[in-house]
Image (spheres, rainbow, N blue to C red):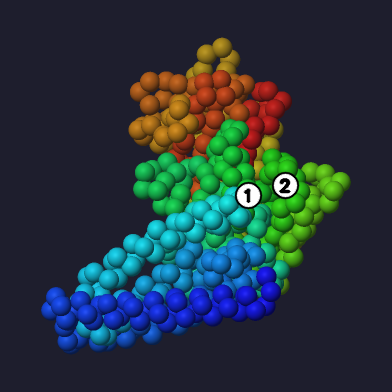
Amino acid sequence: MDRGKRFLILFLFLITFWILLPAVLIIASLLLDSALNMGFSPAGIIPVLSWSLLIPSSILLVLAVIQFRLQAGEWPVSALPSRDLAQGGLYDVWRHPIYLFFVLVMVSLGLVLGSGSMLALVIPIFSGAVVIYAGREEKRLAAAFGSCCRGYIKRTAAIVPKLQILVRCLLLPIVRLVFGVKVTGRNSIPLKGPLFVVASHRSFLDPLFAACGVKRYLNYVTTHQMFRGRLSSFLFSRIGCIPRKRYARDAACVRSIYQVIRECGAVVIFPEGERSWTGAMGPLKEEVIRLLLRFPDVPILPLRIQGNYNVWPRWRSRPAAGRVKVEVLPAFTPDRNETATSLSEKLRLLIEPNDPGVFENNSVSTRGIEKILYRCPACMEFVSGFDSGASSFRCRECGTVFHLSGTYSLCFSNGERDVTVSLDQAYRGIRITPADMKSTCSACGKEITLPDEERLIAYLPDVEIVRDEQEEALRSKERGSMMLTDRRVIFNTGSVSEVLHSSTASVTTEGSARLQMFCSSSNTLYQLKIDSGSVPLWQDLIVAAVREATGRMPVRS
């Protein structure tokens, strides 16, 4: 299109829509006020309200026009097709901010002028016409930009911002303030197009820390447990979460991820599959790496989140103030000959935190540490709890005092020398061994006679047990006991049921108090809420028993 014709179109559009249209609406309203006696004199709070609405609406209207020009490569004129889809700034919240704020400007003018007909007749009719026109425009954009436009329409609002946007506006300022969140590398974030965001997972607050770093609408792959209740399912689906069943292959989760990627959305994945208990990164799940390799043209954005474990380790019941750093690293796409092993190693190097020496904290609460250190690192006796303090705890069996530094290093004396190890090293040192499987675990202290020379390994007298055979909604809760033998896990809630080790497909932890066992033969999920005691202890016991009996390692995360 030549410059003269383009200038003429812009001039006519400016005159028609930005001068004549508002003038026609105002004049028509004043004439109707006179004819229908609908005018009023603004008084009381109305003038304050009208100007409080008019000024910001006018500013946002101008800003929406400028952002459209910068992002779409053209002015917002229907006769001049845009080169790209505007998706940032105001367009990240509303898909038609120009129309929205134009209507709000006219509403505020109706209040300023005291025009009842403008508020009651002209604006509603005009708004209806705008809605119809916006719908036609969305169809035109969908034809031009395909699935990316359809995904953009899903992620944005016409009037009321999506729940994720509201959560970000309300919670992120508090999160930044309380945890002193510092973000670096934002310039490397692709602001449009499909994207995988990958980070380690060491805190319940990691989704919020990721949102602090990446200013885009994010779809989080999260545990299916979050979708068990009607209210939680409604809320988590509205903030963009994608449920994943950790205990079985979940084709629905994969399909949802495919759809988000096809629609040019951003998917946040924590490739370890669960939150770390000790602060150390676990192995990256192979299915996650293979999923990333299926989309070789989709950028992968690594986030290195540091300090997140310090502010809320999994074994502690509540968070504490601290400092968190979110480092946004440059996005990359897998090499043409990339293998799952090489991509896994590359991602680990990029996202693995490096907390020591960066986030010191002289006061670290150790309450709840017995959930992960279920026996004493000094005497190796199983414990029901430690005498915990601000930054130290004492074993009730041997009296050893342990100090926990701000970087979660464990310091104690074993009688011969002083020992300093990471919490992860301490946990690995006290984990269940083959020797522990040869006799009744002393942590349980229960002698029960079993038939056919079956050997009792552990016993839990009181546990909440919930069965789920449909894999959709957990059934009503029951309380009873649980026994672990060298052949099976036995549940007694009035009626006795069992899970043979040969059919135990996965043993995973949920939160800090729940253990989930999936029985492949009956397609049943057992969720166990262990109110007092260590969930990792029972996970380690059952995994070791299954491995001892079958030679096979069940899924742990």
**In the image, which disc is placed on residue 295?**
2
Q: Residue at x 51, y 50 (%)?
A: 241
Badge 2 density bin: few <14, some 14–19, many ≥20, Cα 10 Å: some
Q: Looking at the rendering, in which quadrant would you find the C terminus?
A: top right
Q: Nearer the viewer, residue 529 or 45?
A: 45
Q: Nearer the viewer, residue 480 or 179?
A: 179
> Circle 2 sits in a helix, a strand or a loop, which is it?
loop
Kind of residue at disc 1: Ile
Residue 376 visible (yes or no): no
Mark 1–mark 2 Cα distance, whole angstroms, equals 9 Å
Q: Residue at x 51, y 53 (%)?
A: 139
> Circle 1 sits in a helix, a strand or a loop, which is it?
helix
Q: Looking at the rendering, in which quadrant would you find the N terminus?
A: bottom right
Q: Residue 501: image x %, image y %?
A: 60, 24
In this rendering, position of residue 464 left or right of residue 286: left
Q: Is residue 385 above or below residue 517?
A: below
Q: Nearer the viewer, residue 258 or 538?
A: 258
* Label 1 sits on residue: 261
Mark nearer the N terminus (1 vs 2): 1
Query: How many badges with numbers are in the image?
Result: 2
Residue found at the very far right of the displayed protein: 337
Residue 158 visible (yes or no): yes
**Cβ–Cβ below 8 Å for labels 1 and 2?**
yes
